[in-house]
Amino acid sequence: GWINGVGGCPNVGGICIGCTMPGFPDKFMPFMDEPPGGHVSAAASGVYGSVIRRLRNFTAKTADKEPKWRTRTDTIKTGYRPPW
């Protein structure tokens, strides 16, 4: 319980972390520890992120450009050419 060990679950809307269980928090602290293999997944996501960033920069430089027909003029150009 929350008050001098008396009472039950506070039902405050969060997830249960076992605060009313005997031995809390000592027996239940592993939920705060880093999971096994956490360093490996963090390193892999760092490498993956740098690859994706380079691909996005490449795409932005090559494909993200204004069309050649679009220029600053007083008339509105659409780039449409009639087939006749």
Image (cartoon, rainbow, N blue to C red):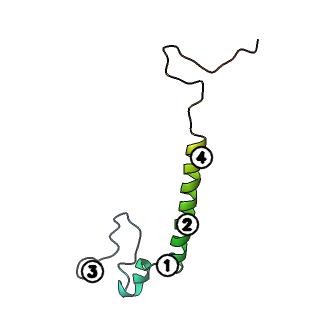
Q: According to the image, label 3 marks what residue?
A: 6
Determine the secondary structure under disc 3: loop
Q: Residues within 10 Å of mark 3 (few under 14, many from 20)?
A: few
**Residue occupying the point 54% across, 55% down:** 53
Q: According to the image, label 2 marks what residue?
A: 47
Q: According to the image, label 4 marks what residue?
A: 59
The image shows a total of numbered marks equal to 4
Q: Residues within 10 Å of mark 1 (few under 14, many from 20)?
A: few
Left or right: where does residue 51 sit relative to residue 9?
right
Q: Nearer the viewer, mark 3 or mark 4?
A: 4
**In the image, which disc is placed on residue 35?**
1
Name the N-terminal-most of marks 2 and 3. 3
Residue 39's spot in the image, x, y percent?
50, 77
How many angstroms separate mark 4 from mark 2 (CA)?
A: 19 Å
Residue 9's spot in the image, x, y percent?
35, 73
How many angstroms separate mark 3 from mark 1 (CA)?
A: 33 Å
Which quarter of the rendering shows the N terminus?
bottom left
Q: Are marks 2 and 3 in contact (CB under 8 Å)?
A: no
Left or right: where does residue 26 sit relative to residue 38?
left
